[in-house]
Image (cartoon, rainbow, N blue to C red):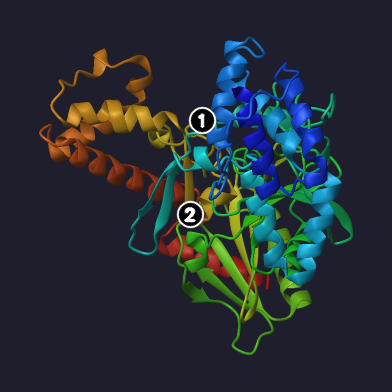
């Protein structure tokens, strides 16, 4: 009987979600109500919950039963699952109190517990994340991480720009406002969302884990006030405060302009986590500062234009970084196509990334420009049009650091359909399905290079290698200072003049 699985869910909550035994009858009765039941069922043996990493195996029969009996309709399973899991999860204030107790032991103890809890209550979709494709792309100067995210749709750059101009309205004001905690209206599923408080540079903020989890313990740190993103001295101080409180995490900000600033610019927020990003391993190409300087400043051997500052002196590194950020905001170099402003619209911003190491603070500044032209209507320093079949979305903070989040459509388009042409299927570009025509050049190139006699595994590997090449090229497209003698010279001059 289905009540057996409801009892198992209660046992799961006691084992992993800190449900107090005193509350188990109450919670079981709330589950009965959600399922339209009014008795406890038979005395069947309740399956063990030992060793479970998530509730999927329990939820599956419950959701199937709810569908069969008409409690929910097709398309409502995700929302109903979230209702069930919210019922057995801690309230936000309870979680906050426990988190603070764990933090008193150590910051990492607290984040380990919080992340595990968000997986166990199914807000962080562990099973969905496990289905994502992920591999390492080996490059001459550094490696990248390539992922095909199967749980999140592509974001339209033009829609992101339009959203920035919209006035706050409705409830919640946007998809990351604090009001979302427990919200399930407008097709949103945030019932199981849990957040914790953090104060950064005197500003009340909160943070949560991302359900999409692009990387290990992917966190979103959010201003409690609904205010647009901006990269300035206050933002940098907030990033520094976060790594002071959570020194095992990195944190960074998107560039706060359309096309180069991620998909959500209307609400001030940052991203961080436990994973070491490819750019973190980048070596110095040119050291700009003097050996005895309080802040060591260098240009990175990286694919886009990035400056690294290192120091044990927090005030000194913040001061140096702010000078570079403000100088870049106003920098123009017509020879290189860099314009700080056109028609009253600013184009220069940067993505600061902050972390702590054994030698002190490290601040990486990735210089960005979002100007468009007739030739490049989606951005001059954006992925160029010939690469849009792979990635057309904004190249935000995460990609700029070397971790690519590619759209789910590629799993089918490239690793199923394109594979067939490399394995012998006749290739006629004009007869390609409509959504495959964007890949005609890619398929033609691979057929020219490798022929059509590959095995499926060989075909998938050559496709991966081509995707790798494209991602390296996209990062080079975003470099505001090109890898030429003229570009390198201008880059060094800019940094030297603004230290």
Determine the residue positioned at 76% across, 64% down.
Answer: 102
Query: Which residue sits at x=24%, y=31%?
Result: 419
Depth check: give the residue in front, 129 or 323.
Answer: 129
Mark 1 or 2: the one toward you: 2
Q: Is residue 349 visible?
A: no
Location of mark 1 (residue)? 374
Q: Position of residue 122 (x, y in %)?
A: 63, 39
In the image: residue 176, left or right of residue 339: right
What residue occupies the far bottom of the structure in this picture? 292
Whole-angstrom CA distance, mark 1 to mark 2, is: 28 Å
Of residues 211 and 76, the one nearer the viewer is 76
Q: Position of residue 302 (x, y in %)?
A: 46, 62
Disc 1: CA contacts within 10 A as few (<14), some (14-19) or many (>=20)? few
Q: Which mark is residue 402?
A: 2
Task: State whether residue 477 is above or below residue 79.
Answer: below
The earlier-in-sequence mark between 1 and 2 is 1
Dot 2, crowdedness within 10 Å: few (<14), some or many (≥20)?
many
- Percent position (x, y) of residue 301? 45, 67
Q: Residue furthest left?
A: 453
């Amino acid at each position: 009987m289905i009540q057996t699985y409801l009892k198992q869910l209660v046992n799961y909550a006691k084992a992993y979600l800190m449900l107090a035994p005193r509350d188990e009858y109450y919670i079981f009765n709330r589950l009965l109500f959600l399922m339209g039941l009014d008795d406890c069922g038979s005395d069947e043996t309740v399956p063990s919950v030992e060793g479970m990493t998530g509730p999927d195996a329990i939820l599956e029969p419950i959701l199937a039963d709810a569908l069969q009996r008409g409690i929910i309709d097709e398309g409502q399973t995700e929302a109903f699952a979230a209702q069930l899991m919210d019922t057995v999860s801690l309230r936000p204030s309870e979680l906050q109190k426990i988190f603070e107790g764990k933090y008193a032991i150590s910051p990492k103890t607290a984040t380990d517990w919080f992340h595990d809890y968000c997986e166990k209550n199914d807000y962080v979709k562990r099973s969905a994340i496990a289905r994502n494709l992920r591999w390492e792309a080996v490059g001459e100067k550094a490696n990248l991480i390539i992922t095909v995210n199967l749980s999140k749709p592509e974001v339209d750059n033009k829609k992101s720009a339009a959203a920035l101009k919209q006035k706050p309205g409705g409830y919640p004001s946007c998809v990351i406002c604090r009001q979302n905690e427990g919200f399930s209206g407008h097709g949103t599923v945030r019932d199981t969302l849990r957040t914790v408080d953090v104060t950064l540079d005197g500003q009340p903020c909160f943070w949560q884990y991302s359900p999409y989890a692009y990387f290990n313990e992917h966190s979103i740190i959010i201003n409690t006030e609904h205010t647009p993103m901006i990269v300035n001295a206050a933002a940098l101080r907030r990033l520094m405060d976060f790594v002071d409180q959570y020194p095992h995490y990195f944190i960074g900000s998107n560039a706060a302009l359309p096309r180069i600033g991620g998909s959500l610019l209307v609400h001030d927020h940052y991203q961080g986590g436990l994973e070491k990003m490819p750019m973190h391993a980048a070596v110095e190409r040119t050291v700009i500062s003097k050996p005895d300087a309080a802040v060591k400043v260098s240009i990175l051997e990286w694919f886009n234009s990035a400056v690294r500052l290192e120091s044990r002196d927090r005030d000194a590194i913040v001061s140096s970084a702010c000078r570079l950020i403000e100088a870049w905001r106003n920098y123009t170099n017509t020879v290189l196509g860099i314009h700080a402003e056109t028609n009253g619209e600013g184009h220069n911003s940067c993505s600061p990334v902050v972390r702590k190491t054994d030698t002190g603070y490290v601040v990486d500044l990735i210089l960005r420009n979002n100007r468009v032209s007739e030739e490049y209507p989606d951005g001059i320093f954006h992925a160029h049009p010939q690469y849009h079949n792979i990635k057309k979305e904004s190249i935000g903070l995460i990609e700029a650091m070397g971790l690519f989040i590619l759209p789910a459509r590629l799993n089918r388009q490239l690793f199923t359909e394109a594979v067939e042409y490399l394995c012998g299927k006749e290739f006629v570009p004009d007869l390609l399905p409509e959504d495959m025509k964007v890949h005609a050049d890619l398929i033609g190139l691979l057929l020219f290079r490798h022929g059509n006699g590959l095995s499926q595994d060989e075909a998938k590997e050559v496709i991966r290698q081509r995707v790798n090449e494209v991602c390296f090229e996209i990062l080079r497209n975003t470099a505001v200072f090109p890898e030429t003698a003229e570009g390198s010279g201008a880059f060094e001059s800019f940094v030297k003049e603004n230290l």
